Image (tube, rainbow, N blue to C red):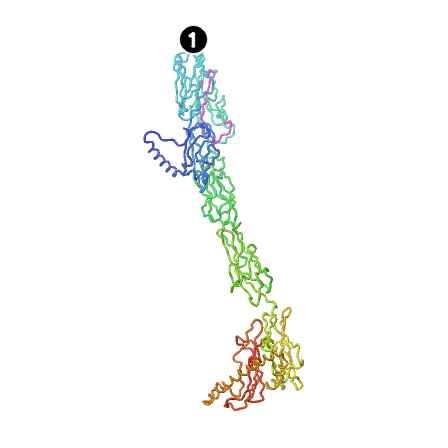
Amino acid sequence: MSGGRRPSGGPGGGRAAVLGAVLLWLCWRAAAERLRYSMAEELPRGSLVGPLARDLGLSADELPARKLRLSADKQYFTVSEGNGNLYVSERLDREELCGKSASCSVSFEALVHNPLNVFHVEVSIEDVNDNSPTFSKAALDLEIDEWIPPGTRFPLEMAQDADAGSNSLLTYDLTRSPSFSLAIKENPGGMKQPELVLERTLDREKQSSFELVLSALDGGNPARSGTVQVRVNVLDANDNPPVFSKSIYEARVAENLLAGSLVMQVRATDADAGSNGRVSYSFGNVPAGIRELFAVDSENGEIRTAGPLDFEEKSEYSFALEARDGGGLTGHCQVQIDITDENDNAPEITILSLSSPVPEDSPAGTVVALLKVRDRDSGENGEVSCELSGEAPLSIVASSGGSFKVVTASALDREQASEHCVTVVARDRGSPALSSVAELLLEVSDVNDNAPVFEEASYSAYVRENNAVGALVLRVVARDLDAGANGRVSYWLSGGSAGAAGAAPLVSVEARSGAVYAQRSLDYEQCREFLVAVRAQDGGSPARSSTATVRVFVLDQNDNAPRVLYPPPPAASGSVGSAFEVVPRSASSGYLVGKVVAVDADAGRNAWLSYELVQASEPALFRVGLQSGEVRTARAVSERDAAKQRVVAVVKDHGEPALSATATLHVVLAESLQEALPELSERAAGAEAAGELQFYLVLALALLSALLVLSVALAVLARLRRAGPPGVLRCLGAQRLSLAGAAFPADFCEGTLPYSYNLCVAAPPRLAAEAAWPPPPPLPIVPAEELVAGEPCEKPSPSSSAVVEQPPADPDAQQVCKPVCSHSSP
């Protein structure tokens, strides 16, 4: 047959084939996935052995992905990549592979990937009758005494047939002769010994020699034959052939004996005397390999080793010895030598497959390598165990057919070890044990299992205000333990207070470097600090990320000059002239004239304010408090001092460089407001026409408003007095009346301290009784809003409040008081 599985024949072959296939499949599963095929020897190269892929359950479409291939010490077969069939790759000679062994097979492994698996395949080599029986000699010479009686048997040489089984079963035939016939004797070992039988007494004088042809025919179909010529010479006297003491000699020796070591000694005796009884020993018809391994001493029959014996190559030897006497008679015996195994072969490790690199997220038990371990010794000498040497999360487990699998014992982590180098140690059970090693280098491929980690969970940065756009604020750094794209970190803004209130983001981050840049110039007075969240994201799939917070503190610079709140500048006073203060001429040294109130939007030292007098009509008359800004008289006011005084103070901060602002305070020296009015009128007369007109319009409006308010107040007061004045209105008597209400200075908490005081001016005296109605026209009263121009205060301040009070000339005169806000530096 050309190869493949043996088909079933006969009727019902289809059912038998199906049943055989089912049984074969069950046996295949039960026998550790072993496939068996049979083929005849000497098939030409390319002959089909069997459908390997189909028997493994693989379709043609799966073959490219599963990568079916063979693994063997010597490649006698090949598998087609197209259809998966098993073919012969070189001509096989059964006699060369297995010799006279009853069975002959070639085993190898079939590897299938994705997933990795191994199948054991055994191909049985069936014998073909390709060898003819042969004799070691072209002619057999026999010398027979003429007096030998009929019926005497003379052993002849046995033919050798290299085939096995029925092809090596020999039958013999002898050419017809009236004097001789052929008999077959079966030896204890099952060998058929041809013997020449003397049928009648020989007469040398009639015929001194005979020429016969011995034919050996094997059991093959067609049969093969071999012949040898048998020449019989008729002699006299030598009538006893040599006889061995045993028909079969047996010996057991260890392999690796030194050349020349004694194996055994055979002995044959001959009853004849003289040269007819002298026996010599020699090999019979034996293969050439026997003569290379053993030698026989022709004189004493000792059999010694001539070459090295190897149990792994052959474990037993059987051959024939011949004893010949001087008369030409021969005797034969069989020699059986058994070779015992020695532990002389270390295990051989073959790496069939190595899956490297292996992903670090591979589960425990993943097969990373497939090994084939073979020990040519037998018994305990050939039993092998394997172990791993080295620190690695790997283990080795035994598989079928001498295979071992290296699997992961626990989870892998590339960040801890990017590769694992282990040593596979294979050791047999011989004494002493032999071992061999093989190195395995397993690389671990990266998986994105680590998120970027910032060097700090939160960062702080300090930036001076008025910075340049694009200035570097700080640089954040995050590291990812993964490799390649999984460890490539990019940065993004993910939130925070930098973009609050609809404003554009204050900072940006460069994706690759993590540098944080200012997107615009920062202003300490608008934003003192802000928080942003920076996200670091790797390039894995899916990506991993982490977040760090960046708190940016804006440092103040002296970029705001002090702002004077009181006295108000001319543009804010609502009139052409500036605010004025009335100081009685009786004021002594230290009299509080007024207070310069200023604030600075900066912070810290940049907001500390100091006050200095830079210009005055009478420089020696006034002084300004360095820290408080209070304008006081430096000496007592004299009659020689001009009625109108002008005081200019400068307000400086403590920044670098310092910034300043000026405040102008007009002072009228008079005992009362009535006395000051002429001075004010003269002062107003000297103003421009447009300013004068505006001033009188405002003044007239203020007088009309005051007259209306006073009329309503007197009417209500007169009505209430009929029923008795309530305590609530006692303040409407001849007491000081505060028209300011609950007004407080603004809370400038940017670095200056609040300060407030009341500014009081005298009201004109009453000329008639309180009950008189209508009251006489009042004297012009300057509204407090014009006397003191200031911004309303949003919060009350518990700071010190100074009230300047001078006793009026008229006890019934009222004083109008208005709180004035002021700030002083700490």
Q: Residue furthest top?
A: 205
Q: Secondary structure at mark 1?
A: loop
* Viewport quadrant of the N terminus: top left
Looking at the rendering, the stretch of residues picked out in magenta corresponds to 304-331
Q: Nearer the viewer, residue 627 or 774?
A: 774
* Residue 813 in which image quadrant: bottom right
Q: Nearer the viewer, residue 442 or 769?
A: 769
Residue 335 forms part of the magenta stretch: no
- The residue under label 1 is 206
Q: Badge 1, how many Cα within 10 Å: few under 14, some, many 20+?
A: few
Find residue 134 and report its horizontal and vertical position in percent. 45, 21
Left or right of residue 400: residue 442: right
Q: Does residue 594 appear in the picture of this structure? A: no
Q: Residue furthest left?
A: 12
Q: Is residue 553 above or below residue 228?
A: below
Q: Nearer the viewer, residue 39 or 395?
A: 39
Find residue 740 and report its horizontal and vertical position in percent. 53, 80
Q: Does residue 209 appear in the picture of this structure? A: yes
Find residue 27 and report its horizontal and vertical position in percent. 37, 37
How many numbered discs sit on the rendered protein?
A: 1
* Viewport quadrant of the C terminus: bottom right
Q: Is residue 320 above or below residue 789?
A: above
Left or right of residue 116: residue 692: right
Find residue 362 and report its horizontal and vertical position in percent. 46, 47
Residue 319 forms part of the magenta stretch: yes
Say what amino acid the circle numbered 1 marks: Lys
Q: Nearer the viewer, residue 324 or 663?
A: 663
